[in-house]
Amino acid sequence: MQNILQEIGIENYIFLSALLFCVGVFGVLFRRNTIIMFMSIEIMLNAVNLLFVAFSTYHQDAQGQVFVFFSMAVAAAEVAVGLAILVSIFRNLSSIDIDNLKNLKG
Amino acid sequence: MSLLVLFYIMSAVTLGTAFMTIISKNTIHSAIYLVICFFSIAIHYLMFNAQFLAIVHIIVYSGAIMVLFLFTIMLMNLNKEDEPHKPFLTKLAATISFCLLAFVLVAAFIKAQPEISEYDNFGEDFQSIKVLGKVLLNEYMVPFEFASVLLLVSMIGAVLLSKKEKTV
Amino acid sequence: METSLILVLLLAPFLGFLFNVFFGKAVGKSVSGIVGTLSVVVSFAVTLYFFLQVNQTGKPISVSLFDWISFRDFNVNFGILLDQLSLLWLLFVTGIGSLIHLYSIGYMHDDENMHKFFAYLNLFIFFMVTLVTGSNLLVMFIGWEGVGLCSYLLIGFWYKNTEYNNAAKKAFIMNRIGDLGFLIGIFIIASLYTTLDYGQLKELIVGGTNGGNTYWIGAACLALFIGACGKSAQIPLYTWLPDAMAGPTPVSALIHAATMVTAGIFMITRMNFLFDLAPQIQNIIAIVGAVTALVAATIGLVQNDIKKVLAYSTVSQLGLMFLALGLGAYEIAVFHVITHAFFKACLFLGSGSVIHALHGEQDMRKMGGLKKVMKITFVTFLISSLAISGIPPFSGFFSKDEILMTAFHSNIALWGIASLASIMTAFYMFRLLYLTFFKNFRGTEEQKHHLHESPGLITFPLIVLAILATVGGAISLPGNSWLNGYLEPVFTKVSHEAHHFGNTEYMLMGIAVIGGLIGIGIAYMKYIKQSQVPGEDSEITGFSKVLYNKYYVDEVYDFLFVKPLNALSRFFRDTIEPALSSLVYGFGRTANYIGTSGKTLQNGSIGFYLFGFVLGVAAILTYLFLAQ
């Protein structure tokens, strides 16, 4: 099977992944809606997963993909728990605006 | 050549939908955009010939995680909410951090100037599901088991956290 | 056996102190007084035993209780040396001490803190015994400091009066100034000879080592003499002694007449072999002693407080003793110490009896005519006054006469000064006697009704001391001196050949006696024949005023030393201390400021925290990848 990287080259994937990550960061800081912030975190995770797979092909090694497995498992678990927390917050405050959660100030 | 074009199209879709996720005012729209983003990433995986991973990606992310998101959004009835405007300082901070981080990451890579001459192509199968299964269950046995424990724990945690308090 | 007896000697007063401190209040006045007195009597009994033993065998007893300091070749152990000199001193310290304890039971009976008084007195005896029996300079210094402390405690015994406290502080501080000299002397000796033990020092010095170090030996002797000045109230460190009369009369009698003030003389006598090597310092000692004797006598001429007269008399007599020391006549100085202890203690106790009868009145201008009412006090007082004026056959005559004779043979000027001082002594002592006991009573009617002789506890010591003052001269009669023979092993030089009694000596004796009689006669003319009574304070003018105000020495000291020190303290308090404390406080304020401004970072908004995350990650990445 042909190594796709011979056609596309690894730099492109690196740039893509970096840009996707930065978009995720932008999303976390830009929106106040907690749901959108979670989605941006998922975008960031996915960017990293993409890079892992690219490098797994680069090294012709399966270990990169195995790591992606685990990353996905963790992402799933994290989403479950995070959304549960979100629901509790919503029950208490009737809003998911993140600027309302300022009580832990020094 | 065609692969390169495909790559560019798919990258555009990925980046565009990711951006739209953030920009969109309607939460449901954001979720849908995100689903499309995940699909495009799955196609990227397919281009790598990582078939198993692509399918698993679709199942887990688009199938489970986004559904969870959509459920929660609907639970909280967030379709047409109007968000108060964020102060300008925050928007500025977000933009600055985005540009900064992008710049740093790209610059770091460019400065590294890796010598990539030849891409290996052993021709042997390293990522089919058979090999993957072998690697997963031989070398990564312990993390595998722990992952199951992790999922169990998060399930219990999620249930506990979202329990309604019993009204006295 | 001997060690345990020595421990009894040393610790009996200390146990009395502890008993009175812890149980004195509970057991009541009589018991605490009796316990206090008994502890000193026990010491006296042990002293007597050792005295008889050493007198017979002639060999001193030396015991080392424990090793104290030892490094390289410098060793100091806590040792006790009971030789002829220390036993003699102990005899009259514990003997007169017991008498005064007995006296205090009667005198301090009305005081609510009597147990504290006896505690302090016992502590004083303990330290004095340590001072006298120590076998090296450092143990003596322990006792030296301790008696200074007890002097402070006892002078300020009636602590509710600020003036008494000031007097106590003055005594202590002046003592400390002298102690600095003493310490410097000890240091010099330690560095010269690497030992402080008397026996070893005597061997080294008499053996002739360090022959070329006369400069340092002179410095050590001078420093030790300054220490003695502080403790024995010589010029310039004498002003504390008259102020120390603020303490109760038994304290004045014990500490400031008979025992503590003689510590300086004891120290110099102990180190006689060292002082013999520094003749210039001995000259200085003699001159200082003579001048002090004269100056104090002149001040005493016009004082109106009965105890102040006696205080200046003590300073004057101490000056005579130092004169004797300076002339190298150590055993004569010791003789005068002993006789002076007898008659001065008797005088002080007698004055205490008078003050007790008059319920605290101390001004002689308000006394008079007491001889009809207080017969025993009068007779003992008369005997002691005759003794101090140098009238034969009382003890004072013999001792003072020896001093004058020795002075005559060395330096006529010193003899002249000492004789003048003796004439003045006779005058003011009899002035005191006449004003207090003769003529008519000048006090209030109320006091007159309550006049009575003091009880037995007070008059018994007076009688004993008067008897001793009468016969005490027998221990060193001219030509046949038991004392000189007894003390001979202590001294290295035969300081002066026994006077062969020729015409000069008899003539001098005659001159001295006539001088004393002249003094008594002038006092008689003024105060009996002319019935003069000293005027009120405002009426004193001219040179008398200078004398009455003690030559304004206190004011001079105040101006030269006290005020600058106070100004320095004020400077530190107002300038340096706020600066330092604001420096320290500034640290706190800075930390506080940093904390408060750092607190704004924790504003609770998650967006801000995430922004911080991103910045941090960017920074780390920049550092790792771009900055290398």
Image (cartoon, coloured by chain):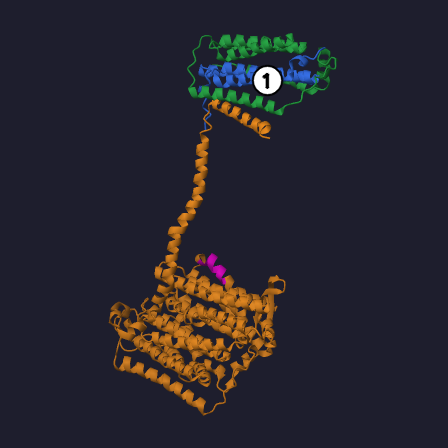
Q: Position of residue C401 (x, y in %)?
A: 43, 83
Which one is in front, B68 or C504?
A: B68
Q: Is residue C214 magenta?
A: no
- Residue at image x 54%, y 27%? C619
Q: Residue at x 40, y 48 (%)?
A: C578
Q: Is residue C548 visible?
A: yes
Chain that is coloured blue in the picture: A
- Give the amino acid type for the residue marked by disc 1 in the picture: Phe
* Crowd tier of the residue under label 1, counting other residues whose Cα lies within 10 Å: few below 14, some 14–19, many 20 or above: some
Which shade of the palette goes to chain B? green
Q: Which residue is mark 1?
A: A15
Residue at screen point 55% across, 78% down: C491
Bounds of the magenta segment: C16-24
Q: Position of residue C2 (x, y in %)?
A: 60, 69
Quadrant that contains the N terminus of chain C: bottom right
Residue C462 position, x and y percent, is 41, 74
Tell me which chain appears orange: C
Majority secondary structure of the magenta segment? helix
- Position of the C terminus of chain C, as image quadrant, is top right
Q: Residue at x 42, y 15 (%)?
A: B85
